[in-house]
Image (cartoon, grey):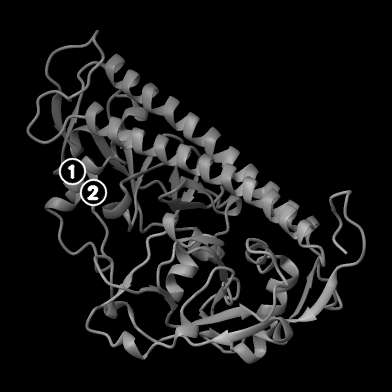
Amino acid sequence: MPRLRFPEFRGDWISKPMGEMYSYKGNNSLSRDKLNYRSGSVKNIHYGDIHTKFSTLFDITKEHVPYINSSEPIESFKAENYCTEGDMIFADASEDLADIGKSIELIKLNSQRIVSGLHTILARQSATWLVVGFGGYLFTSDAIRKQIQKESQGAKVLGLSAGRLSKITIQFPSDISEQQKIADCLSSLDDLITAQSQKLDALKTHKKGLMQKLFQAEGQTVPELRFPEFWGDWEKQSGSVLFEQISNKKHNSDLSILAITQEHGAIPRDSIDYRVSVTDKSIESYKVVEVGDFIISLRSFQGGIEYSNYKGLCSPAYVILRRKRDDSEAFFKHYFKTSLFIKELNKDIEGIRDGKMVSYGQFSNLTIPLPTSNKEQQKIADCLSSLDDLITAQSQKLDALKTHKKGLMQQLFPVMTNDGEE
């Protein structure tokens, strides 16, 4: 029995092997190069899309699904192998245990012809055991996911067969009204999560557009968008005029080791899942990073230069930059992450992508545009920082909704005990 139940429902849940509830239909083995997003008469569910983008409850009107190329012989497809609403499709291959057997339930197909593709298992109910919309959530519950993971086989690449999938035990309410109420509850929460995700994406898009207008672009003397109290051309200075290279190795190895990340900047390794071991001897050669320093990493050509909010140590492989003047560090914090700067960083630098890093000499030759007024620098930084705070707050709301859904799922469905029983 689940821990949490709507009060109007009573009685035990039904327990059945999946093999008694589902039969399996045919799929195809068409690779990506046999698919396209332009035209065709039959659409194809590829296992990679189940892993990366399709929603648990699959609605064709909300998903971007490829067509099978017209050159492929679709006449050989049997009628029973075309997908129907209520079908479950499982990804039968994955390099990650967490994703093996990941599934979607087809809840709306709009009369379109769709088939199950490469590395998938198409399962169809032999009778109306589960109401449409309930199965998608049921097969993402912890108890069923753990069973599927136990049935997977393989070393580097895990695989799952229909035969092994048939062995898992499914527990569900006999009353389809209870199934529907669970599905409606979780679907409403998914709608909230989707709306929050869209709000967050809109804010990120707004920030990206604002950054392009607040910073001076190539060929401009001033940015497209400017605060009204400031005027006059911006100055352009080389990297060597604005920043010096720092290589301070005077420490007792008692400072936190920093991970240099594109998402969080320079951050203590122990605050994130960063599993790289280092010896005491190697730490002796590490460089001291001060709060406000900037760091060029191996991935700077992709994500810009990172800022450090922490004092700590970083690998000697990194280049540490420190301001020479009293310019706003927050201005550079935002500018070094713009697409404008990253494009400039890539323009005249060769050999980065084969493992080489941007050197201080290469950075020194870059031309960096900035306001002559520190007040204007700071106002631009404050504007973008306020937007960052809003994005962080909305991101935390999204995380809270996802955590709430996860906790609710654990209570609305039976859980697996330590001895493997539900």
Give how far apart the Cα atoms at labels 1 and 2 are.
6 Å
Mark yes or no: residue 333 visible. no
Label 1 residue SS: helix
Question: Relative to 64, does residue 210 appear above or below in the rendering?
Answer: above
Residue visible at 40% across and 37% down?
Answer: 202
Eyeballing the image, is 26 above or below 47?
below
Q: Amino acid at mark 1?
A: Ser
Crowding at dot 1, Cα within 10 Å, few <14 / some 14-19 / many 20+, comes out as: some
Q: Outermost residue toward the left?
A: 219
Quadrant for the C terminus, please.
bottom right
Whole-percent x, y for residue 255 in the image: 56, 47
Tag 2 secondary structure = helix
Q: Residues within 10 Å of mark 2 (few under 14, many from 20)?
A: some
Residue ID for mark 2 = 360
407, 234: nearer the viewer: 407
Q: Residue at x 28, y 34 (%)?
A: 209
Q: Position of residue 142 (x, y in %)?
A: 72, 67
Instruction: Answer whether labels 1 and 2 touch (C-beta < 8 Å).
Output: yes
Q: Is residue 243 above or below residue 214?
A: below
| Residue 314 visible | yes
Work out which quarter of the rendered image holds the N terminus and state it.
bottom right
Disc ID at residue 364: 1
Find residue 170 and report its image quarter.
bottom right
